[in-house]
Image (cartoon, rainbow, N blue to C red):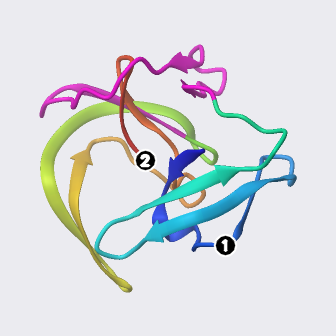
Amino acid sequence: GFVTAGHCGGAGQSVRGWDGSAIGNFQGSSFPGDDYAWVNVANGWWTVPVVIGWGTVSDQLVRGSNEAPIGASICRSGSTTHWHCGNVLAKNETVNYSQGAVHQMTKTSVCAEGGDSGGSFISGDQAQGV
């Protein structure tokens, strides 16, 4: 399975791929407070430790999850705006949404748009979150 944004769906909801095919179901979800979910992939599907580069860069192999420090370069991959990079600006931030606050967020200079939610953040070859 894989991790995505919690506001993208709740336990039991179907998850669909880029082509509309069902690839699995949300097994658990947390939002607000946190913003993460676990998707269990269906038979016939599998996951690989790769972040899509969208043709801007080559797809990036994930080799670990060591936390990037403030000031580090960080990139994100999203289905709407694709691949963008910036820097880590702050840690342990709180973001207030209409549904409630989300805590322990990392602030970056990399902007995202609707539809990018659940996309990967990576620093070098180290996963940073979604």
Tag 1 residue: 12
User: Which residue lies at the image location 69% right of the left edge and 61% below the top edge?
Assistant: 25
Say which quarter of the image contains residue 94. Answer: bottom left
**Amino acid on which the number 2 mark rests in the picture:** Val
* In this view, 110 is above or below 74: below
**Does the magenta run of residues contain 56?**
yes
Helix, strand or loop at label 2? It is: loop
Where residue 19 appears, as percent x and y from the top left, is: 86, 47
Where residue 24 appears, as percent x and y from the top left, is: 73, 55
* In this view, 72 is above or below 128: above
The residues colored magenta run 48-77
Tag 2 residue: 130
**Does the magenta run of residues contain 71?**
yes
The reply, left or right, for residue 52 in relation to residue 124 is: right
Where residue 33 appears, as percent x and y from the top left, is: 28, 74
User: Which residue lies at the image location 86% right of the left edge and 54% below the top edge?
Assistant: 20
* In this view, 109 is above or below 38: above
Q: Are marks 1 and 2 in contact (CB under 8 Å)?
A: no
Helix, strand or loop at label 1? It is: loop
CA–CA distance between discs 1 and 2?
20 Å
What is the chief secondary structure element of the magenta stretch?
Answer: loop
Say which quarter of the image contains residue 63. Answer: top left
